[in-house]
Image (cartoon, rainbow, N blue to C red):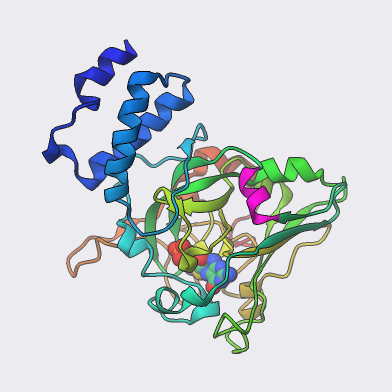
Amino acid sequence: MLIKRLSDGFIHPVPSEITPPAVYARRRELLKLMAAGAAGPVLAGWAAREALAADAERPGKLAQLAASKSGVDGAVTMEKVTEYKHATSYNNFYEFGTDKADPAHNAHTLKTRPWTVEVEGLVKKPAKYAIEDLLKLSAQEERIYRLRCVEGWSMVIPWIGYSLSKLIEKVEPQPGAKFVEFVTLADKKTMPFVGSNVLDWPYVEGLRMDEAMHPLTLLSFGMYGEVLPNQNGAPVRLVVPWKYGFKSAKSLVRIRFTDKEPKTAWNKAAANEYGFYSNVNPTVDHPRWSQATERRIGEDGLFAKKRKTLMFNGYEPQVGQLYAGMDLKKNY
Ligand SMILES: Nc1nc2c(c(=O)[nH]1)N[C@H]1C(S)=C(S)[C@@H](COP(=O)(O)O)O[C@H]1N2
Ligand SMILES: [Mo]
């Protein structure tokens, strides 16, 4: 059955079919088959050719990062994935400047090896993980998530990583742990804006324990089949797809379990604008602008229609229960 499907065109795609999205789709198909344990000699030959084809279509020039297709229901497969060039050139990473183009220009100075992530606070097994060990802690999965910035733009990105819950289970939080704090690198030598007063460095974010444990919350090491570009938060970042982009802290160095709500960088900078929860909510306006619509990066021509922003960024079926009974206007 499987072999027949493979011989039906997967093995010998006509050259005109080898367009980047097609190669990408077939690579994903292969990974799915491999995950199902269907890899055989025929497939292996195909995989070798496919790898060559994929190599020619690599979005960047970074190391590849293999991942199987995710079983977590976070995909937005009906939507077009944002082009790599947009996802890597329009960024917020204030350590490298406040203009959207700054991180792509400046983040080459970030040194991502050696890199460690310290897990501390209210856990039974505090540990300092070398990035190499963190990468191997659980199987890498590819998940297509929307990322929606509080400023009103969004992207659809094929992230690679695994649920943060895998790490949390490993370190065994103590019963008193109610929140998780995420601290990111603040290195004046390599990050030109650390030292400026735009934010109180280091950049800090936080989640409630159940949010951190939710399977959608991704500890991400890559995107588009490769390791993360520096400007996107190398070598490891968070992706919390139902919250505004600023909750997805980049270049993590410390994860701390605590009994108190962490003081986050944006909340400290402007408490009335950036609350702790920061769930994507089209009915709660930012004090200075509406959150009802968004523009998708790459589709932003003069006449491109804005999209309606969805409650919890479209992940309401998965995460709505976490906030049952909470006043989401008060807890913005
Ligand atoms: N360390 C750090 N992480 C950060 C930021 C930052 O300035 N510093 N910006 C946040 C904001 S506001 C957004 S919208 C996302 C952007 O992620 P992207 O560049 O991969 O799209 O990163 C978030 N993580
Ligand atoms: Mo953002």
> Which quarter of the picture shows residue 278?
bottom right
Q: Is residue 261 left or right of residue 175?
A: left
Tell me if residue 258 comes above or below residue 143 in the rendering: below
Q: Which residues are magenta?
A: 130-136
**Residue 137 % position (x, y):** 66, 42
Tell me if residue 169 comes above or below residue 269 in the rendering: above
**Residue 1 part of the magenta segment:** no
Name the residue at 67% across, 42% down. 165
Name the residue at 20% across, 19% down. 8
Question: Which of the image's four quarters has the C terminus?
Answer: bottom right
Residue in front for this viewpoint, 9 or 214: 9
Q: Name the dominant secondary structure of the magenta segment.
A: helix
Name the residue at 33% across, 14% down. 2
Residue in front for this viewpoint, 43 or 99: 43
**Residue 190 % position (x, y):** 57, 80
Any part of residue 325 in sight: no
**Residue 173 % position (x, y):** 82, 46
Residue in front for this viewpoint, 15 or 105: 15
Q: Is residue 241 left or right of residue 41?
A: right
**Residue 5 % position (x, y):** 27, 17
**Residue 135 part of the magenta segment:** yes
Tell me if residue 293 comes above or below residue 217 in the rendering: below
> Which quarter of the picture shows residue 33?
top left
